[in-house]
């Protein structure tokens, strides 16, 4: 049986997202074994996300200049090397000393973890931008919603369902194992990408100066009001989401008494909702329309964030995350397919990079704010209450964001229509 390029692409993305899901637990959980300071714990995921603010624009130019398949292949190999570095460093540091309330117990190990996270994050910027711009070359434009939905369902199954559970059990068994497993997963993904046949270098004029090419992509985004709005909305939403994600680790450990295995299962429960959102997103968009879908899936984060703060136990958090991830994937169905369909292929990498600079560059800010909020309020409110404060702050932020963007999201899509179901 002949394996189509799209099938190979989906399989490779599934493997890399399995690695991402394992790392979702491993990065911050291992950091919490080296320090109990929320701000220092946030440094590791900040190192993972900061490259989006630094490298997103150059990644767009590179993506529009080179063979996107080869770029993905190179970045997967680089990430395999970074996870190998983290695994070897952690093996050498065992047994880990007890984590202090302030400072870190093993500074050199902590530093190596930050370096590896930064390498993985930098490669992810180039890899993800290339992947989103490569997909339209493999499927007809009228099938983009369905293709994206199927791709995201596979990615979510690996990233948020299987990955966190595997990561939790691996880190509980031996701290370096999640990182060693990821090195293998990214290596296998690189082999799959290497076998994808097709032409994935964009058709375009001769390359110009970097500044000229970046300006062209920026002008396109600034001249497209709906794209510009969605970039800002996604950026601020990601900031609030990261406040919740990093605060959830200590909240689950200290307030709800969860260990790594329970934490991984809670994240996996959220993935069930995300998988359903990926599979049903195109139908919901066709039924409600893209504008109304975008409005309500954005607003849904408000009760979700508040609910996490008042959840009596891990099971309630799991149910909330299930509903939350469902709405998040439906939002993605609207936003990503709209970009892929409306942006010209020769500009897709650059416009996508500017968009994602706004959308992902805010993540490190959210991680930093979460740690600052907890540390700042702990003396007055106590540790337990302070750990839930980022959830309330994020809910208030998304509420304001929804109010400010509601009308423009509702009417901004105009005559835009999704493609037929397949």
Image (tube, helix red, strand yellow):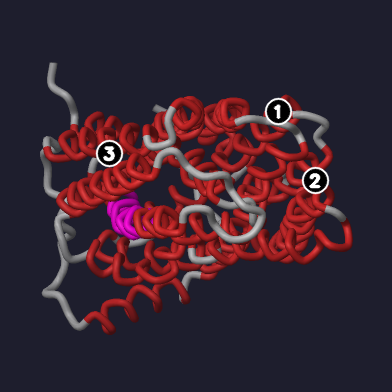
State the residue position of label 2. Answer: 306
State the residue position of label 3. Answer: 183
Q: Which numbered mark, 1 or 3, is in the foreground of this view?
A: 3
Q: Is residue 240 visible?
A: no
Image vertical order of residue 329 relative to residue 158, above or below = below
- Alpha-carbon distance for marks 1 and 2? 13 Å
- Alpha-carbon distance for marks 1 and 3? 32 Å
Could you tell me which residue is drawn at 36 percent across and 39 percent down? 179
Q: Nearer the viewer, residue 316 or 357?
A: 316
| Residue 319: mark in rendering | 1
- Alpha-carbon distance for marks 3 and 2? 37 Å
Q: Which numbered mark, 3 or 2, is in the foreground of this view?
A: 3
Hey, which quadrant is residue 321 in on the image?
Answer: top right
Q: x%, y% of residue 83?
A: 31, 45
Could you tell me which residue is drawn at 11 percent across and 74 percent down? 206
Element assignment for label 3:
helix
Please state the extent of the stretch shown in magenta in the rendering.
Answer: 117-133
Hey, which quadrant is residue 196 in on the image?
Answer: top left
Element assignment for label 1:
helix
Q: x%, y% of residue 189?
A: 23, 36
Could you tell me which residue is drawn at 61 percent across and 64 percent down? 368
Magenta-drawn stretch, dominant element (helix, strand or loop): helix
Q: Is residue 252 visible?
A: yes
Q: Is residue 126 magenta?
A: yes
């Amino acid at each position: 049986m002949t394996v189509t390029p799209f099938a190979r692409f989906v399989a490779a993305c599934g493997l890399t997202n399995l690695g991402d899901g394992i790392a979702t637990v491993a990065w911050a959980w291992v950091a919490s074994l080296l320090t109990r300071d929320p701000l220092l714990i946030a440094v590791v995921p900040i190192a993972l996300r900061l490259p989006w603010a630094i490298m997103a624009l150059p990644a767009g130019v590179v993506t529009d200049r080179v063979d996107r398949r080869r770029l993905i292949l190179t970045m997967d190999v680089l990430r395999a090397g970074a996870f190998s570095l983290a695994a070897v460093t952690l093996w050498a540091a065992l047994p880990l000393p007890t984590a202090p309330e302030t400072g870190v117990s093993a500074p050199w190990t902590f530093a190596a973890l930050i370096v590896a996270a930064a390498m993985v994050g930098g490669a992810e910027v180039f890899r993800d931008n290339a992947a989103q711009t490569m997909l339209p070359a493999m499927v007809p434009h009228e099938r983009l919603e369905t293709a994206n939905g199927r791709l995201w369902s596979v990615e979510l199954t690996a990233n948020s369902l299987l990955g966190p559970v595997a990561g939790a059990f691996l880190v509980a068994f031996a701290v370096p194992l999640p990182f060693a497993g990821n090195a293998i997963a990214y290596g296998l993904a690189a082999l799959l990408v290497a076998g994808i046949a097709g032409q994935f270098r964009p058709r375009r004029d001769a390359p110009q100066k970097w500044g000229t090419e970046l300006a062209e992509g920026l002008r396109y985004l600034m001249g497209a009001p709906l794209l510009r709005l969605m970039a800002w909305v996604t950026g601020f939403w990601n900031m609030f989401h990261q406040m919740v994600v990093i605060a959830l680790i200590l909240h689950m450990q200290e307030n709800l008494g969860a260990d790594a295995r329970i934490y991984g299962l809670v994240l996996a429960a959220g993935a069930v909702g995300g998988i359903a959102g990926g599979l049903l997103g195109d139908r919901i968009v066709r039924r409600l329309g893209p504008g109304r879908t975008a409005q309500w899936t954005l607003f849904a984060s408000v009760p979700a964030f508040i609910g996490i703060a008042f959840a009596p136990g891990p099971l309630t958090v799991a149910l909330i995350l299930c509903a939350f991830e469902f709405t998040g994937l439906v939002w993605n169905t609207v936003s990503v397919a709209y970009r892929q369909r409306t942006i010209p292929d020769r500009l897709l990498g650059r416009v996508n990079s500017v968009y994602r600079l706004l959308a992902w560059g805010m993540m490190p800010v959210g991680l930093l704010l979460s740690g600052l909020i907890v540390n700042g309020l702990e003396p007055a409110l106590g540790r337990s209450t302070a750990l839930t404060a980022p959830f309330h702050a994020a809910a208030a932020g998304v509420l304001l964001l929804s109010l400010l963007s509601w009308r423009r999201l509702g009417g901004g899509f105009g005559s835009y229509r999704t493609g037929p179901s397949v």
